[in-house]
Image: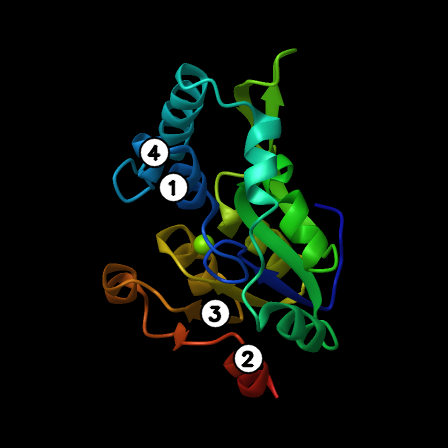
Amino acid sequence: MSEVLEKVACIDLEGVLVPEMWPYIAQRTGIDVLHETTREVPEYRLLMARRISALRSHGVTLPQMQEILAEIAPFPESTDFLARIGEQYSVRILSDCFYELADPVLGLLGRPTALCHHLVTDDDGFIVRCEFAPSRRGKEDVVTAFLDAGSEVVAVGDAFNDLEMLKLATRGFLVRPSESTRAMASSRICVVEHVDEIVEMLR
Ligand SMILES: [Mg+2]
């Protein structure tokens, strides 16, 4: 990563700024297997392979999913939070989601700079594979690169896959975690109910 920023806020998307997308797709398509998360299938690539195969066997294409996801709105406090934290920090949305799915809701959030993965489709619009962001095992690799470049890093997340970046960051905030995520979080990580508390605490 060549970017050098003095102060950067690495912010997770789903569960922090917007609702979880896969449960929403599961509900709207009636495909039960899409309710599975990394809690049931911890290996993300395997989880995505299961999702892709289920979508294919139920005849659901990416454009159909995008139509469903266009119904999703950000949480009410999200736009204001991004504007306020953006006054002091360069915002980077750091998500294990995919640009092709997150695009409508990122538009509603004012198009913050986002680091996501890509989905590849065939000519009929079916997802055939994921194209994961290169040189990145987890979000913590992005945070480490910013820290190594001398940046002050605030990290905000809500789930197990955020814990490592929250622990490494200069300040880490965990938003509305599940009981099990909270139990695994290091004591350095600050737990909040709403993102606007974070702006207050950074003053
Ligand atoms: Mg999340």
Discs 4, 3 touching: Cβ within 8 Å: no
Amino acid type, mark 4: Glu
> Which mark is first along the chain, 3 or 1?
1
Mark 3 Cα shell of 10 Å, populated few (<14), some (14-19), many (≥20): many
Foreground of the two, 63 or 179: 63
Name the residue rendered at 36%, 24% in the picture.
50
Quarter holding the N terminus is top right
Distance from disc 4 to disc 3, alpha carbons, whole Å, reads 24 Å
Task: Single out the mark in the foreground, 3 or 2.
Answer: 2
Left or right: 120 with respect to 165? Answer: right
Q: In terms of secondary structure, where does tag 3 sit?
A: strand
The residue shown at (61%, 22%) is 120
Instruction: Using the image as rendered, state which of residue 27 and residue 167 is in the foreground.
Output: 27
Which is more foreground, mark 4 or mark 1? 1
Residue placed under numbered mark 2 in the picture: 196
Measured Cα–Cα span from mark 4 to mark 1: 23 Å
Mark 2 or mark 4, whichever is nearer to me: 2
Residue 159 x %, y %:
38, 56
Q: Is residue 171 above or below residue 69?
A: below
Residue at the disc numbered 1: 27
Task: Name the residue carrying label 3.
Answer: 172
Label 4: which residue? 43
Q: Residues within 10 Å of mark 4 (few under 14, many from 20)?
A: few
Q: Secondary structure at mark 1?
A: helix
Q: Is residue 197 left or right of residue 57?
A: right
> What is the tally of numbered marks visible in this picture?
4
Label 3, label 2: how far apart the Cα atoms are: 14 Å
Question: In this orientation, does residue 171 appear?
Answer: yes
Q: Earlier in the sequence, mark 4 or mark 3?
A: 4
- At label 1, the amino acid type is Gln
